[in-house]
Image (spheres, grey):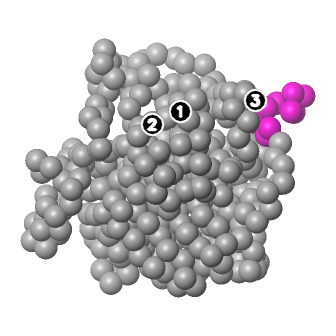
């Protein structure tokens, strides 16, 4: 149940430039629904209009990498589908927005993951130095997953207010660091983590924008990563690129888009613009391949961004779920696994 902020946490909220009129806000006006659309219309279409191929018919191809056996000396990333990642950089292990329960909804079983996308469970995850949570939506902050992982996590870093969820679920307050946009923390091994803007919203109940959504910039002596979370396209990408870029790799939101909520999620063409603004050498387009949260065909995000990138010419990474991405290897190639076997 959402609670209104009070006491020390309210004081900290009120000190944030993002907190205005009792709610966190984006840099620019961000309507939840595009003009001409409404919650009622969207809900009706979602419930009663049949859209083709929103879920794959076949089991998705995936790779079960043994994370426990990975050497800490290897700079590597594993995508778990949607926006969940395991990242190992300069000897530290990060876990981003893990969802291993097979569900992306407050109602168990109401938004099940695609077959073949849920090959990992909490037992497959090694000890984690830093759990990073970009915001508190159910497809990014999963109660069953983070409670199962609690004994494996050393520290949690997230946005203002999100720590309240974790503390109610048994996390010690001393484990949790809450950041505002442009705050930073210096981690072990001389790695710095910056909290940076995103264009989105928050909330797990009827109260919206009571916690802060964000993205992360991870700077180590060997590389610089942008961890995007959820965001619509806006000027913040250019601001982040100018302040922290160029990036060796950007993880960006490229799925579950819809004309009805254009301001809060990116279409494939927006992803390529954002990657350019960030001055990213490589881009991994996530937020697809696991859950149906919009009405487009399940494979459309990957198809469209691959086609559009033929002109943009960016280094687009398209790993299978569970397939290692070796961050220090610029020439690693990936197949178009979302295509039928006779087309790939």
Q: Quadrant of residue 181 in the image?
A: bottom left
Distance between the alpha carbons at the discs numbered 2 and 1 = 6 Å
Q: Residue 82: x, y in percent?
A: 57, 47
Q: In the rendered image, which residue does mark 1 sit on?
A: 270
Q: Is residue 339 magenta?
A: yes
Residue at screen point 60% across, 36% down:
272
Element at badge 2? loop
Magenta span covers which residues?
A: 336-344
Q: Quadrant of residue 74 in the image?
A: bottom right
Q: Residue 305: x, y in percent?
A: 66, 32
Callout 1 environment at 10 Å: few (<14), some (14 to 19), or many (20+)?
A: some
Residue 69 vs residue 218, the one in the foreground: 218
Residue at screen point 79% across, 32% down:
339
In the rendered image, the quadrant that contains the C terminus is top right
Q: In the rendered image, which residue does mark 2 sit on?
A: 233
Q: Quadrant of residue 325 in the image?
A: bottom right
Callout 3 environment at 10 Å: few (<14), some (14 to 19), or many (20+)?
A: few
Q: Is residue 228 above or below residue 77?
A: above
Element at badge 1? helix
- In screen coordinates, is 261 left or right of 329? left
In the rendered image, the quadrant that contains the N terminus is bottom left
Q: In the rendered image, which residue does mark 3 sit on?
A: 310
Distance between the alpha carbons at the discs numbered 2 and 3 = 21 Å
Q: Residue 294: x, y in percent?
A: 49, 30
């Amino acid at each position: 149940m959402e609670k209104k902020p009070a006491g020390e946490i309210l004081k900290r909220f009120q000190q944030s430039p993002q907190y205005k009129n009792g709610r966190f806000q984006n840099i620019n006006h961000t309507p939840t629904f595009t003009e001409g659309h409404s919650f009622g219309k969207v809900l009706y279409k979602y419930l009663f209009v049949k859209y083709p191929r929103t879920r794959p018919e076949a089991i998705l191809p995936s790779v079960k990498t043994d994370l426990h056996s990975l050497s800490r000396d290897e700079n590597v990333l594993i995508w778990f589908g949607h926006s969940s990642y395991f990242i190992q950089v300069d000897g530290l292990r990060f876990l981003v927005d893990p969802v291993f329960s097979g569900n992306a909804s407050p109602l168990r079983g109401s938004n099940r993951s695609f077959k073949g996308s849920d090959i990992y469970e909490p037992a497959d995850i090694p000890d984690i130095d830093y759990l990073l949570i970009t915001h508190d939506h159910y497809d990014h902050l999963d109660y069953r997953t983070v409670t199962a992982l609690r004994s494996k996590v050393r520290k949690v870093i997230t946005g203002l207010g999100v720590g309240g969820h974790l503390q109610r679920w048994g996390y010690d307050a001393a484990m949790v660091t809450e950041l505002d946009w442009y705050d930073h923390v210096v981690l072990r091994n001389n790695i710095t983590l910056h909290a940076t803007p995103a264009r989105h919203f928050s909330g797990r109940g009827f109260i919206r924008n009571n916690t802060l959504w964000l993205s992360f910039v991870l700077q180590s002596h060997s590389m610089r990563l942008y961890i995007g979370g959820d965001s619509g396209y806006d000027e913040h990408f250019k601001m982040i690129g100018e302040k922290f870029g160029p990036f060796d790799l950007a993880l960006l939101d490229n799925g579950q888009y819809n004309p009805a909520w254009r301001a809060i999620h990116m279409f494939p063409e927006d992803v390529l613009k954002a990657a350019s603004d960030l001055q990213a050498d490589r881009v991994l387009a996530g937020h697809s391949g696991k859950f149906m949260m919009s009405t487009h065909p399940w494979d459309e995000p990957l198809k469209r961004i691959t086609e559009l990138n033929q002109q943009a010419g960016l280094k687009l990474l398209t790993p299978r779920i569970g397939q290692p991405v070796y961050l220090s290897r610029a020439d690693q190639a990936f197949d178009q696994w979302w295509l039928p076997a006779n087309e790939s």
